[in-house]
Image: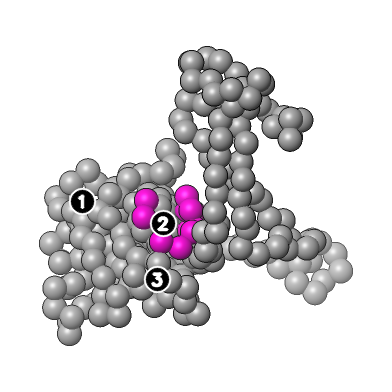
Amino acid sequence: FNATRLADRIGALTVPAAPLKAIVVAPVDYLSSSLGFRRNVLVFHFWTSSAVPLGQDAALVIQGQEGLRGSSLACWADEAVAFAAQLPPDVTCESGVDLVGAPFLRLRPSRQSILPGYYAVKVQASNPIVESTLAVSWSVSSFTNMSTPLSTMQIDAAGIAQGFSLRRSMHSALSAWTDAGHQYENRPGRASVVSFAFQLMREARPQPFVDDLIVRVPRGFQLRGDCLSSV
């Protein structure tokens, strides 16, 4: 490889290495980061290297860290991305909390193995009700012999998914629906003006941080594309 002429250089061939037996994860997507929010939706994105086999008491495990004590996961695992691999339709789900109170979710193959690939799993969850200085990340791993802790064997090395910062709710938030004449309008299809009053717990962070104020309205209502024109 140190020849000056291309014709004198030794040729080379690259051979792809076998994939590492590890799970690769992405940061967790979420609906709300408010403390105590009971109807959150989390999306876990991960790539597995090995199959979760059938008949070996195996499971794919999503485990919350200690900073997530007091939260919970519901057995409502659904695919969130159309091009992601599909979980077997007969996969079974177990959810609960561990000895320190952190939530976990276990997906077990029932009639067919969970094949290796990219998955995007959507799960209903609740947020902790108190702040914690401990880690709020998640681990995704796979094991065999799950029912016998002393003989449990890891299939793929665990991947650590970055969680999200938990925030306190606003001190107060009120709304009043009016039309242009400042009279209540409840007829369908009529234009109205809505006024919001709220009290923030802290000031917005200075540049280069970007803080967003998000207002969600009930399904069916439509907002102007340029909502600031009437503020």
Amino acid found under the numbered disc labelled 2? Phe
Q: Quadrant of the C terminus?
A: top right
Residue lying furthest bottom: 150
Amino acid found under the numbered disc labelled 3? Leu
Q: CA distance from mark 3 to mark 1?
A: 25 Å
Q: Is residue 4 above or below residue 169?
A: below
Q: CA distance from mark 3 to mark 2?
A: 13 Å
Residue lying furthest right: 4
Q: Is residue 87 left or right of residue 151?
A: right
Q: Quadrant of residue 53?
A: bottom left
Q: Is residue 190 above or below residue 218?
A: above
Q: Where residue 184 sits in the image (x, y, percent)?
A: 54, 24
Residue numbers of the magenta segment = 27-39
Q: Which residue shows up at 85% across the image and 64% down it?
A: 5
Is disc 3 surrounded by few (<14), some (14 to 19) or many (20+) residues within 10 Å?
many
Indicate which disc, 2 or 1, sits on the residue closer to the N terminus: 2
Residue carrying label 3: 68
Towards the viewer: 38 or 107: 38
Is disc 1 surrounded by few (<14), some (14 to 19) or many (20+) residues within 10 Å?
some
- Asked whether residue 199 is drawn in magenta, I would say no
Q: CA distance from mark 2 to mark 1?
A: 28 Å
- Asked whether residue 36 is drawn in magenta, I would say yes
Amino acid found under the numbered disc labelled 1? Val
Q: Which residue shows up at 61% across the image and 41% down it?
A: 196
Q: Which residue shows up at 34% across the image and 70% down it?
A: 70
Towards the viewer: 176 or 34: 176
Residue carrying label 1: 91
Q: Quadrant of residue 21?
A: bottom left
Residue carrying label 2: 37
